Image (cartoon, helix red, strand yellow):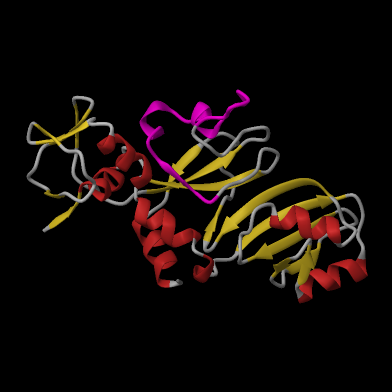
Amino acid sequence: MTVRIAKFIADSGYASRRVAESMISDGRVTVNGTVIDSPVYFVAASDVVTIDGVTISAREETKLYMFHKPINVMTTSRDPDGRKTIYDCLPSQFQNLKYIGRLDYKTTGLLLLTNDGALARKLTLPSSQIPRTYIATVNCINTSGLSRARNGITVDGIRYAPMEIDVLDDNNLRVTITEGKKNEVRIVLRACGCPVRKLHRISFGKIRLGKLPVGKIEQISQKTIDELLKSL
């Protein structure tokens, strides 16, 4: 079985497919000692692929991890403003993992990471409809505003799907969404008169953060991965 060279590189966890294509165009990739200049090139597991002289291994077993993201950390590989990123918090053996979706700079809690680019894409597709649950600490509870959010709301021309919202106490809400649009919880709650002070994700599908300490990473079992995929 053969695959395109860019996909081979992406599946190895070395770089995204887009970055891999750029590396190929720059002449940084060789197959069996020959420089490849086109992403339309197919390789087999037996071929020797190198990038800048470093041999890239064939696709490895899919692994999924949960990471307890701290506050004031960017979900990105590098930040132009020099802010700390999740990779600054992760041990060296996890530096090539891909994040699944994003948590913004101020949001804490469960962030999934994987070595499988295809899995990362699958879990972030809007059609996957995977529930993500957060604890939102808000300035105040606006009952009528929350009713609007539960029924779906349009903010600045963007339509947000209905949210499942439970009032925990005078300042805390449990919010479950399935779309995962950028800053969705913060935008909708602010529009509904409940501006968010703190936001913390506690679950992604059947995966729960539990008592994992801040800044720590833990591998997820194959059984849990299978259950997550079956729910799609």
Q: Residue at x 79, y 63 (%)?
A: 155
Q: Residue at x 87, y 56 (%)?
A: 194
Residue 48, quarter of picture: top left
Q: How far across and down, in percent of the image, does residue 232 sit?
A: 45, 71
Q: Residue 90 magenta-drawn?
A: yes
**Residue placed most toward the observer, 55 or 222:** 55
Q: Position of residue 104 (x, y in %)?
A: 65, 43
Residue 14 picture location, percent across and down? 31, 37
Q: Quadrant of residue 33?
A: top left
Q: Is residue 40 above or below residue 226?
A: above
How many tags in the picture? 0
Residue 230: name its quadrant.
bottom left
- The N terminus sits in image quarter: bottom left
Pick whichever, 161 or 197, lies toward us.
161
Q: Is residue 173 left or right of residue 179?
A: right
Span highlighted in magenta in the image: 78-101
Q: Considering depth in this image, is 201 or 26 the residue closer to the camera?
A: 26
Which residue of the protein is positioned furthest toward the bottom in this rendering? 151
User: Residue 124 magenta-drawn?
Assistant: no
Q: Is residue 95 left or right of residue 11?
A: right
Q: Is residue 50 above or below residue 154?
A: above
Q: Nearer the viewer, residue 223 or 154?
A: 154
Where residue 28 appears, x then y in whole percent?
24, 30
